[in-house]
Image (tube, helix red, strand yellow):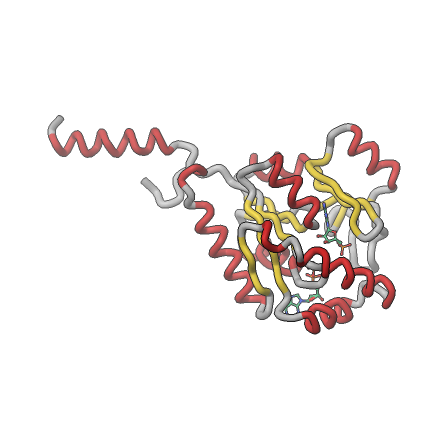
Amino acid sequence: MSDRGTIRTFPVIFAAPSGAGKTTIARELSTRRRDVEFSISATTRPARRTERDGVDYFFHTEEEFRRMIAEGELLEWAEVHGYLYGTPRRNLVQARDRHHFLLLDIDVQGSRQVKDVVPDAVSIFVLPPDGAELAQRLIGRGSEDGEVRRHRLLAAREELNAAAEFDYVVVNDNLAAAVGSVETILEAEALRIFRRVDLQEEVRSLISDVDRVLGR
Ligand code: ADP
Ligand code: 5GP
């Protein structure tokens, strides 16, 4: 019996106050491992200078986004910082077909929805080492002006209150260590007995091997 057997791959949700580093961790993990893929969300937020459609997000008008909701194309969706964000259902279907772990970088509202409809999902809350560093990372990222940044820090206070709802917590102080912790979670979760697709068959085959040795 191989250590990995056949397991049903599962989605891994990353949530965190804006600026804690969940996108950085999820992106880094998806470059390190071939069995994970990053879930590209749909959003009505305008693209930042460095962002590309279909790579960072699928950028949509609000009308297009509402149509996707109406047609049931989204696994979850939420309004975050004044814009709509959602996970295309096909991301999960494709990842499962490819036997990949899907990494979802979504907010707390979306995390709750995914946990409701995909019970085998694993959720990780990413914490910054401290509040000053969180503010510093938001400034360093340079993607928001002062007013928007202030709004995000206010929202961060709210998101932090949801930390206890998650399965795991990872403090993103040193990036390599944080990515390492996430890999540990992934490896351990992959070994959980209920994820094993052919458990009964594997056990039956082992019993027949033992029986053969016993001459039964
Ligand atoms: P989030 O997705 O949680 O909003 P990002 O991944 O965009 O956060 O990270 C916010 C900023 O912090 C980015 O500029 C990123 O490069 C930086 N960053 C992420 N992780 C670390 C880390 N461990 N140490 C220092 N800077 C980091
Ligand atoms: P940003 O605009 O900084 O890329 O993301 C803002 C927030 O929206 C982050 O907390 C991010 O995790 C969240 N977000 C991104 N994509 C999705 C999504 O598909 N669904 C939900 N619910 N939140 C998302």
Quadrant of res 146? bottom right
Which of these two is toward me, 46 or 72?
Answer: 72
In the drawing, does residue 29 fall left or right of residue 132? left
**Where does the image place residue 192, in percent across and percent down from the top left?**
42, 43
Against 133, residue 33 (above or below) is above
The residue shown at (65%, 43%) is: 112
Position in image of residue 181 (x %, y %): 51, 60
Q: Quadrant of residue 18?
A: bottom right
Q: Residue shown at 58%/49% (left/top)?
A: 123
Looking at the image, the residue that sits furthest to the left is 215
Which quarter of the rendering shows the C terminus? top left
Q: In the rendered view, would you say 77 is above or below 107?
A: above
**Residue most toward the top?**
216
Residue 22 versus residue 133: which sits nearer the camera?
Answer: 133
Viewer-nearest residue: 8 or 15: 15
Question: Against 161, is 65 above or below?
Answer: above
Image location of residue 63, percent across then percent down = 88, 36
Residue 134 position in % (x across, y down): 70, 68
Instruction: Using the image as rendered, state which of residue 148 and residue 5 is in the foreground.
Output: 148
The residue that appears at 59% across and 56% down in the rendered structure is 31
* Apparent side of residue 86 relative to residue 187 in the rendered image (left or right): right
Q: Is residue 205 left or right of residue 175?
A: left
User: In the picture shown, does residue 65 fall above or below 126?
Assistant: above
Looking at the figure, which quarter contains the N terminus? top left
